[in-house]
Amino acid sequence: MNRMMLMLLVMFALVTTVEGQELLRDRIDTEIGLNPVTGDDSQSVCTDFEFIRRVYIDVTGRHPTAEAVVTFVSDQSQKKREQLIDQLLSSPEHARRLQHHFDVVLLQRLPKKQIDLANWQQYLFESMHSNKPWNQLVQELLTVDGTDAATRPAARFILARELKREETVRAIGQTLLGRDLQCAQCHDHPSVGDYLQRHYYGISAFLSRSYLFTDPKSKVVSIGEKADGDVKFTSVFTNEEDATSPRILDLDAIDDPTIEEEPYVVKPDNNNRGVPKYSRRLQLASELTSGANSAFRLNIANRTWALYMGRGIVEPLDMFHADNPPSHPRLLEELAQFLVDQNYDLRMLTREILLSKTYQQPSKRPSESQNSEPFVIAELKPLSPEQLGLCLLQATGVLQTIYEKHRVALTEGEDAIDETTAEFKTNLEAAVNKEATTHVDKVVRTFASANQSSRFDAAANQALFLLNSPLIQEWLDQPENLLIKKLKSAENVSEALSHVYITVLSRNPSSDELDLASDLVREFDSEQVAGYQHIIRLLICSAEFRFNH
Amino acid sequence: MGASAAAGFGPLLTPAMAKQAKGQKKQILQVYLQGGVSQFESWDCKPGTKYGGPFREIQTTVPGMKICELLPYTAQKMHLLSIIRSINLKTNDHGVGRLFMEKGRTVGDYPYIGSVASRYLKNTNDPLPGYIHISTRGLTDNTTAFLEAQHGQMKLEGVAPPENLLPRSGIPESVLTKSEQFRLQLNKQFGTGRSKSLIDSYDASFDQASQLMARKHLFESQPKKDLNRYGHHPFGQNCLLARRLLEEGVTCVKVTHHGYDTHAENFNFHIEQLDEFDKTFATLLGDIEDRGMLDNVLVMVYSEFGRTPKINNKYGRDHWGASCSIALGGAGIQPGAIIGATNADGTEVSDREVDGGHLFHTYMQAVGINSTSDHDIPGRSVPIGDPAASAIEELLA
């Protein structure tokens, strides 16, 4: 046979596992239209500089230190990208990043209600750190009634919405099923044919018997449930009345079983939280996460893809319907099926996505006329408010200084921990996170909005913050700031500026950039450090800093 | 901005003027009386009745239209405004009422009037933010819902400059200029071969920021002559700033006057509050008219609800959303009209009942936004106004 056929056979053998199944990462590349193995493909992926910055921000929420960049770029090993991915995915920083991400997805920056926020965040962090399967997490959020202090934080999903129907049903639809059913509350959705009023009330029927119970003695609020009550609804357009049992979208309705005689385990009254023998709310968790409900797995597969690729296969993420088809339907099905096969292990799916060539595409088009198919070129991904906060701390030397302070504290003295242990890494991250959060919160306040859109937004007050905020100046002026110390001890302006670029933008400056920047620093005369600080402030205002690329 | 050619014609435009005005940018001035102004003590008096309270009503410049004696200066301007007396918000809750009046909807995540106006009326090259809210206290809400962040309210703490307006001290002017070039060069380089729309959005926010920085004089001291006319109190200063912002082309300016939640001493507090409000508001409205801006500026004076007919044992009135009023005029609103009515003792709406949904449609239509169409957002179909309500047609000129 000819050379080409031989090469193809060899390639096919390389991309399949022993069992003969193609790896998901390669299926991704095939579906997107990037041939997985085309000989020397080092041209078609992003540079090492770009890769380490991108994967650090995506996986740990902040860009790499200057040292990490230099080490990675000079490392000659073939498998360094895969090793870096695995190192970052197993880090506590990754769990923290997912805590921030899922907190915003699931709780949409709602204020504290009933549940202590620190407890909730810790619960979410531990769930991510232990790689809790997604379906298990969702079941906890929907079934925990708040009476047990150990599991109570999970009840925030429901309690933050005070079990108000319009908020709770909407949240379930948006965050767990990829469908914003808000408009279907009062009538069938006026323009989305797939979103019907009975879909809205089908979900509501699981929750309509539940209510908030306040313990008269402890004043603690938990979730109780009655054994009766049915859901009826009327369309304000047609005035037709209808009713529904609990029902997930178009799956079968779940009728109540016949209960002989006493329907309650605990009868509801002023002193007692109602506990029925048959709980509609507990059914919600099992029905929603069941294999029969494809919306559940498609939603999380799409959201995971969007998190790392910058855009969902279905966009917007909460608009799954027939007139808004996925850009790559077969791929989305495969991602969802993979998750099911892996028992909803999000880390496994993430790993496959990060290892694909698709993830590693450059964000810059080599020429003007280029394929504009989604995902062929990497998307620019605006930093989330939390990512921006951490990156600002990293860019100004604050994060490095905090890390070093706590590293020293943990490795010295009587209770010293060995730096190579997992325990050390976890304790260090926890201590750093506690201190960093006080700074990050100030950034989040300016950059966060309750806007659920995944589109990028920029406002004048945010630009003013980056340009002029005295807070950022305080960070740079801290006497113990390790970055500033290093810049002070640089041999010359060039060396200092190169270090600034590597620290802030994870790359070397071009000679033109070096000239421009040196020119600016010269304007500061003898106050060279002020000059370097000024350059840092300019770089953090750049689009290159604002977007992960 | 203002059609100076229309000055002197007031609200009665000739068809030619109307056509010209249509091509000009519309704006909105919101004066929010926070806490719930009493309709009995303002727009819908019931003197001499069981719940009417001690004040009389006075004539206005509109024959047949009388308002409370606590508003003598505003009474001289009523030929520029209309009153709706038949609002039933079906709520007595501050939050619910306020959001209903701002969003035109009782439930769900929707943008406020100011953000909608900013989105559809603001020109791309307008230097200032499209929606500015001047208030000396209160929370900063997210007002944009699913619209872009740049249409969110920029909250000003009274006449103090926006946070971080002033550049860091000690940086020479030459450095600032070179720095801006440096930043633009960085973005140009980064933008080559990358998503133009994202980077343009980002650049636009810095443009807006520098426009704000160039206008810091707006937030420095105000001319004494003007302050004498507007009043040397925060509400006076805020309204003066509001006028200047409208003159600078800000699409929607909202000023909040606090202190109307009069559960106790309703009558004394209304004397104080409306004394401050009356002269200032009349001056502001008069200035807008004098500058020929009224044809293009929708003006509204509103609260989150009214106050109870029943007077409680602290001489107060409590929350009452069942029958309350609003005053509005300018832009496409026919002035000098009274829409709707309440019964003789002011305990319920007797004619032409409307709610926040109808009002919202009316505001939008008055500034040329089709409230029955969908928002211009990708991937979603969301009507601008609640489809279950409609504009108050008889009020639209």
Image (cartoon, rainbow, N blue to C red):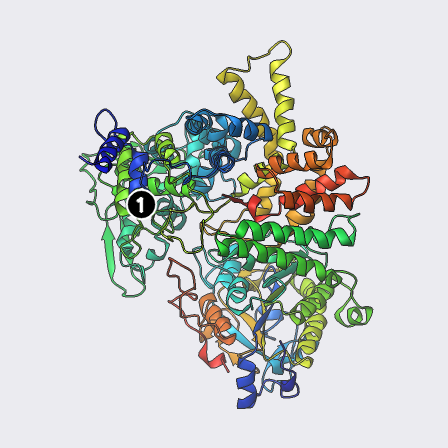
Q: Position of residue A257 (x, y in %)?
A: 19, 38
Q: Quadrant of residue A524?
A: top right
Query: Which residue is the site of mark 1?
Result: A33
- In this image, B89 relative to B36: left or right? left
Q: Position of residue B89 (x, y in %)?
A: 47, 64
Question: SS class of the residue under badge 1?
Answer: loop
Q: Residue at x 62, y 55 (%)?
A: B206
Check the image and report above or below for A147 versus B154.
above
Q: Is residue A217 visible?
A: no
User: Neighbour class for label 1 at 10 Å: few (<14), some, many (≥20)?
Assistant: few
Where residue B162 appears, as percent x and y from the top left, is 68, 55
Callout 1: chain: A
Q: Is residue B73 left or right of residue A64?
A: right
Residue drawn at (77%, 49%), measured in percent from left and top?
B171
Q: Does the rendering let one see residue A311?
A: yes
Farthest residue in the front direction?
A2
Amino acid at pointer 1: Gly
Which residue corresponds to the image point at 52% horizontal and 71% vertical from the top-left? B346
Q: Is residue A217 left or right of residue A356?
A: right
Q: Nearer the viewer, residue B196 or A97?
A: B196
User: Residue B64's image quarter?
Assistant: bottom right
Q: Nearer the viewer, residue B323 or B222?
A: B222
The quadrant holding residue B298 is bottom right
Give the position of the N terminus of chain B as an image quadrant: bottom right
As rendered, which of B226 and B188 lies closer to the eye?
Answer: B188
